[in-house]
Amino acid sequence: MKRRSPQDEIADNGPLQALAEALAALSDAGDVRAFLEDLCTPAELEAMADRWRVVPLLLKGVPYREIHDLTQVSVTTIGRVARTLERGAGGYATAVQRQQAATASASH
């Protein structure tokens, strides 16, 4: 991973924006999965999937230790996700809301 100062990251968000736009351009879950498999290492995919797995459990108020027992995700990672849910950019919440809306509209 490249070492960048916080100022570098703020000044150069073009690559991250381009990546976000590439993901947004993919409307099919299979296409997104293929893109992620091409983009990320297996370890990176596992780490992201682990984080995503604990989000719904945290939102339900399941205790960290129980989440760990259910998922085998480390308590440290669970805590990190919980902090991001509280103080992050809102991406987890948006994704959960959109996923729930899509599930609700598919069941009607």
Image: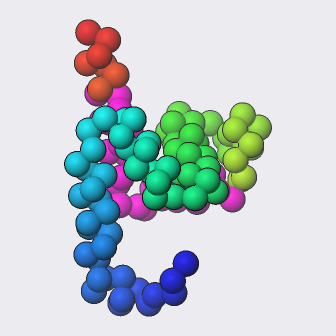
Region of the chain picked out in magenta, as a range: 76-101
Residue 47: give x, y in percent of width and height: 60, 54
Above or below for 71 versus 12: above
Location of the C terminus (image quadrant): top left
Q: Quadrant of residue 10?
A: bottom left
Instruction: Please state which of residues 14 and 10 is positioned toward the viewer in this rendering.
Output: 14
Residue 56: give x, y in percent of width and height: 51, 36
Q: Quadrant of residue 22?
A: bottom left
Q: Can residue 90 be found in the magenta stretch?
A: yes
Magenta stretch secondary structure, dominant: helix
Residue 41 located left or right of residue 22: right
Residue 81 located left or right of residue 32: right
Q: Can residue 49 be found in the magenta stretch?
A: no
- The colouring scheme, among rainbow, by chain, secondary structure or one colour, is rainbow
Residue 48: give x, y in percent of width and height: 54, 52
Residue 87: give x, y in percent of width and height: 43, 61
Residue 71 located left or right of residue 15: right
Residue 10 located left or right of residue 58: left
Which residue is painted at 35% across and 54% down in the image?
A: 90
Q: Is residue 55 visible?
A: yes
Q: Is residue 79 visible?
A: no
Above or below for 43 versus 103: below
Location of the N terminus (image quadrant): bottom right
Which residue is painted at 52% across and 44% down in the image?
A: 52
